[in-house]
Amino acid sequence: EVQLVESGGGVVRPGGSLRLSCAASGFTFDDYGMSWVRQVPGKGLEWVSGINWNGGDIGYADSVKGRFTISRDNAKHSLYLQMNNLRAEDTALYYCARSITSVVVTAFGDWGQGTLVTVSS
Amino acid sequence: DIQMTQSPSSVSASVGDRVTITCRASQDIRTWLDWYQQKAGRAPRLLIYAASSLQSGVPSRFSGSGSGTDFTLTINSLQPEDFATYYCQQAHSVPLTFGGGTKIDIK
């Protein structure tokens, strides 16, 4: 069974940093691309960033480019999102999502339950 | 960036109804279009990928069609568990983008 478990969310002040983690199990991690997708409670879905199977191809939403960094450790079956210079508009539930293929640009076949990030003074 | 526009934003329907949701892309995305279902408090669930391919485990009453800029998700014979919000997503190019969602509620 595929499992994606996010952690690292919390309350942070504007301008602060957080590092999200996603622990993956139940599949061959380095066969798949991975992404972070966020959702403000009660609102729609926004893709944040994605990474291909070996980290050689990475993409970001314009809203986070230059502030967020995605990475993965295939040996640890883990995905990460380093979030710097956080803004109030980054407040959302952050989902870890597994691509249906090895690339960044694809559908997401499996999702975690999300970790909540709140940016507030 | 490719903009995805869904319509309607909400629809009231009854069990047994046929429901159609449309999604329009701001440019040609061929068939790089996916559909998700999301229930309150839950993560999204992939229903359809590549415009018309049914994800494993998804009931056959769900179907997708379209290419280029115009796409549809059809739910035949709506079931009680289908009342949820549905999103389209383009998988043509970065940044990946979602439609605004269509909520199906009980009439």
Image: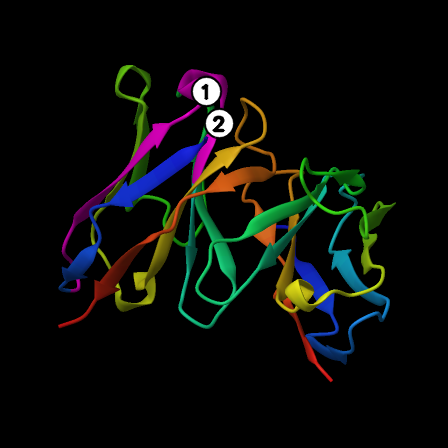
Name the chain under label 1: A
Position in image of residue B58 (x %, y %): 70, 44
Classify residue A119 as left or right of residue A36: left
- Which quadrant of the figure has residue A2? top left
Residue type at mark 1 is Trp
Q: Could you tell me which residue is drawn at 13 percent across and 64 percent down? A: A13
Whether A33 is among the magenta residues is: yes
Residue A10's disc is none
As displayed, is residue B1 above or below residue B85?
above
As displayed, is residue A104 above or below residue A19?
above
Picture colour scheme: rainbow
Position in image of residue B9 (x %, y %): 68, 74
Crowd band around label 1 with a 10 angstrom C-alpha radius: few (<14), some (14–19), many (20+): many
Classify residue A10 as left or right of residue A60: left
What residue is disc 1 on? A53
Position in image of residue A27 (x %, y %): 45, 22
Whether A121 is among the magenta residues is: no
**Circle 1/circle 2 CB separation < 8 Å:** yes
Q: Is residue A54 visible?
A: no
Between B70 and B50, the residue placed more toward the observer is B50
Q: How many marks?
A: 2
What is the CA distance from the residue labelled 1 to the residue labelled 2? 5 Å
Q: Is residue B56 visible?
A: yes
Q: In this rendering, do the residues under marks 1 and 2 share a single chain?
A: yes
What residue is disc 2 on? A33
- Which quadrant of the figure has residue A93? bottom left
Q: Could you tell me which residue is drawn at 37 percent across and 37 percent down? A: A4
Crowd band around label 2 with a 10 angstrom C-alpha radius: few (<14), some (14–19), many (20+): many
Between A35 and A29, the residue placed more toward the observer is A29
Q: Which residues are magenta?
A: A14-35
Position in image of residue A43 (x %, y %): 48, 70
Query: Which mark is first along the chain, 2 or 1?
Result: 2
